[in-house]
Structures are given as structure tokens and as C-alpha cells.
Image (cartoon, grey):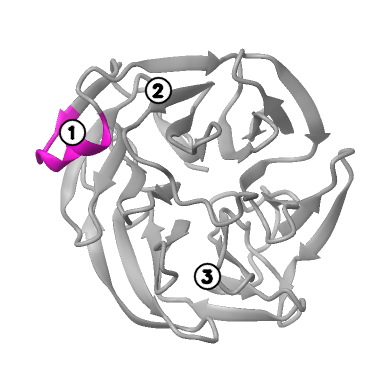
Amino acid sequence: MILPAQTAPPRTFALKAESPAFRALIAEGAKLEKVAGGFGFTEGPVWDGRGFLYVSDEVQNKVFRVYPDGRTETLLDIGDPDGSYFDRRHRLITCADVLRALIVIQPGGQYKILADRYEGKRFNSPNDVVLGPDGALYFTDPTLDLPKGDRQEIPFQGVYRLGEDGSLRLLTRELEQPNGLAFSPDGKRLYVDDSKRRDIRVYDVAANGDLRNGRLFGTEEGPPHSGVPDGMRVDRKGNLYVTGPDGIWVWDPAGHHLGTIVMPEQPANLAWGDKDYGTLYLTATTSVYRLRTRTRGFVPSAKK
């Protein structure tokens, strides 16, 4: 979570193309729709094939089910829930900042801690999680939401791999503030953004899940209080959709900035949804929005 500053300038929805390729992904006349509002700070969207979206609210301390018609249901009351994803068994996995843990949420609203320590030391505040091509969960652990009064026990902010067998491995500690992350559709690259440096890094992924050849993919600079890299997703062609200054920045796999979806509220995260995974659902501060695209999202956890 990166709370927007109260002095952030007002914005209206717009599509700013930097390349003609942007229009092949999002039509010029595409309309942004508000699905639901009245939240505190929305995060962790995950589309469920049964026809609704899971959404975390880091201010109201709840995980909701949000339906396309705007209805909401509380699934779980828990302190400061953050990024979420489905694992290979289609269980809802969530980063729980107050617990400083990665948890699995049961359909009835109960939860179980999957991991909360590395080498006996408590995590900082797990922030975002994705499913890897090997069935493992990959997650970031910055200090962004370290509970007030708690002591930082791990002296760095890392990216980790939690195997299906419960094994935990540190993959890299080189980022200053790792946040959102996403795999390329072929599973050969992992993208991780660094909110403090305002950039996106990309790594080659070895067969055992190790990360190699870390390098800069792109930077998302903007004026103060306009937003930083946070959540990210990819489409089936490998294009990246990354939160950043003013909204969602769209990148091609080669690192070219194709355009920006300017949002009326600063987004923190996003997810592909609807039956064909052709709609972007965007958690943006106090609201949830959707935007129909011309492409299809890459969702490895989707039930076939």
C-alpha cells in the first residue's frame, strides 16, 4: 500500500497514447465504469470465476466480495490486508500486514498462516503475491506497512519464493522497496517494481525459481504526489499494466511505454476479470473501477 497524498491534484479519466500500439490494446472510446465506492483504501483485487471480485480494504480492515452490480459482502475482518492471488489449488492467498504474514483465506472467512518468518525473524509486511509457473508463491516484503511500534527484524526488503512443499527461499534483496510483481506468460521472466526508486526491474527465472540477471526494465517518473509503481499485471501477449503516476502505465515486453490510463483516483492495484478476462478491474483509493480492453489477461490461476 502507498497511500496517496492529500494534496494530490484532481484528475479525470483519459487515455494518453504514447504509441499507436496502445490503441490495439485499449480502444480510443473505451469507457471507465465505477463498480463500487465508499471504501477506505482498496487493494488486492482478484477475479473469481463465479462472477465477483475479491478486494482488500486497508483502512476498513476487511476483505470484500465485490459484484459487478456494485453489491459488496464482507468475507473477512483482518488488520490491513494487501495484495492477493489464487494458488494452484484455487485458494485465496492474501498478504496480511498486521500479522506480517502470507495467509490463505477459507471460503467461510477463516484464515491460516502460510509463512510469517524467514530464518526465525518476522517478515516486514508482505505486500503482494503471485503464482509462479512452478506452482510456488512469489511475494514481496517491504517495510511499507510495518505495524506502528513493531520492530523491523529482517534488515532488508526482499522477494521470496514459498514452495508448495512449504519451503521458503529468499530470491533477492537488491530492491529498496519491492512492491508489485508479475510473471511473463512463458514464465521465463519475473517483473518486480521498486516503489522508492520508481522503476521496474526484470529477472530471468531459472528452472528452480532462482532469479538471475536482474536489470532495469523501465522507470515511471512523475510530479510529486502523482503515484508510484505499485501493483502490476500482464496480458497474454506479455504487455505490462503497472500502476504509476496518474494511473496505469502500459508497457510492451521490450520496455517501451505505450501509453497511460489516467484515473480519477490513484490506483494501487489491478486484476483481469469477467468470463474472458478481457476487463481490467482497478482498485483506486476509495473505489473499484473497470475498463474493457481489446486484449485478454494472462491469469495462470484461472480455472479452465
User: For mark 1, what is the residue?
Assistant: 23
Circle 3: element type: strand
- Disc nearer the start of the sequence (2/3): 3
Q: Is residue 17 magenta?
A: yes
Q: Are marks 1 and 3 in contact (CB under 8 Å)?
A: no
Amino acid tagged 2? Glu
Q: Position of residue 191 (x, y in %)?
A: 38, 63
Amino acid tagged 3? Val
Q: Is residue 7 above or below residue 138?
A: above
Q: Are marks 1 and 2 in contact (CB under 8 Å)?
A: no
Count the labels in the image.
3
Res 265 label: 2
Circle 2 crowding by C-alpha within 10 Å: few under 14, some 14–19, many from 20: many
Q: Position of residue 260 (x, y in %)?
A: 23, 35
Farthest residue, direction front? 304
Circle 3 crowding by C-alpha within 10 Å: few under 14, some 14–19, many from 20: many
Q: Is residue 176 above or below residue 195?
A: below
Separation (CA) of disc 1 from disc 2:
22 Å
Q: Nearer the viewer, mark 1 or mark 2?
A: 1
Q: Is residue 178 above or below residue 243?
A: below
Left or right of residue 275, residue 88 in this image: right
Res 90 label: none
Separation (CA) of disc 2 from disc 3:
28 Å
- What residue span does the magenta drawing correspond to? 16-26
